[in-house]
Image: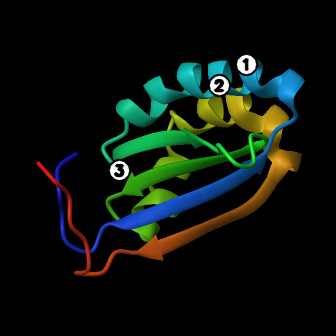
């Protein structure tokens, strides 16, 4: 992922029942093409809880919160993306944007 200053991170926390997890992961696998084609999306990942296996966190890096809300959500990519993940909307525990800070480190 290209690092840009002041990009926005969207965090979506889900609680997904065991019998729906395969379908949930497939929905995001299919929806990913719309994120990948968006000029506003810098990258994403879906992570799965170990201690709490019903929990998933989707992390999406946007060029900015404004471009996410008024760019991606008004683009032709949004409705196909939303239609794929909409079955899990009621499973959302949190959906918020966060700003990055200068405090980070990654081992290369």
Q: Position of residue 13 (x, y in %)?
A: 68, 55
Using a 10 Å C-alpha cutoff, classify the residue at mark 2 as few (fewer than 14 neighbours), some (14 to 19) or many (20 or more).
some
Residue lying furthest left: 108
- Among the 4 quarters of the image, the one containing residue 49: top right
Give the numbered dot on residue 40: 3
Using a 10 Å C-alpha cutoff, classify the residue at mark 3 as few (fewer than 14 neighbours), some (14 to 19) or many (20 or more).
many
9 shown above or below 90: below
Identify the residue position indicated by label 1 in the image: 22
Q: Residue at x 75, y 19 (%)?
A: 23
Quadrant containing the N terminus in the rendered view: top left
Q: Is residue 2 left or right of residue 101?
A: left
> Which numbered disc, 3 or 2, marks the residue that appears first in the sequence?
2
Q: Position of residue 61 (x, y in %)?
A: 39, 55
Residues under labels 3 and 2: Cα distance? 22 Å
Identify the residue position indicated by label 2 in the image: 25
Between residues 62 and 70, which one lies in front from this camera angle? 62
Q: Is residue 99 left or right of residue 10?
A: left
Residues under labels 1 and 3: Cα distance? 28 Å
Between residues 64 and 75, which one lies in front from this camera angle? 64
Q: Position of residue 29 (x, y in %)?
A: 55, 22
> Which of the two discs, 3 and 2, sits closer to the camera?
2
Q: Is residue 99 left or right of residue 31?
A: left
Answer whether labels 1 and 2 touch (C-beta < 8 Å). yes
Q: Residue at x 79, y 41 (%)?
A: 54
Q: Residue at x 53, y 70 (%)?
A: 97
Give the numbered dot on residue 12: none
| Secondary structure type for disc 2 | helix
């Amino acid at each position: 992922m290209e690092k840009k200053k002041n990009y926005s991170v969207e965090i979506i926390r889900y609680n997904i029942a065991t019998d729906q997890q395969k379908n949930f992961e497939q929905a995001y696998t299919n929806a990913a093409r719309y994120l990948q084609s968006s000029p506003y999306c810098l990258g994403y990942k879906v992570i799965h809880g170990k201690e709490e296996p019903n929990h998933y966190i989707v992390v999406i890096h946007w060029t900015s919160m404004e471009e996410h809300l008024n760019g991606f959500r008004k683009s032709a990519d949004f409705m196909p993306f939303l239609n794929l993940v909409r079955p899990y909307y009621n499973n959302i525990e949190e959906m918020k944007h966060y700003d990055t800070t200068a405090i980070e480190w990654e081992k290369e």
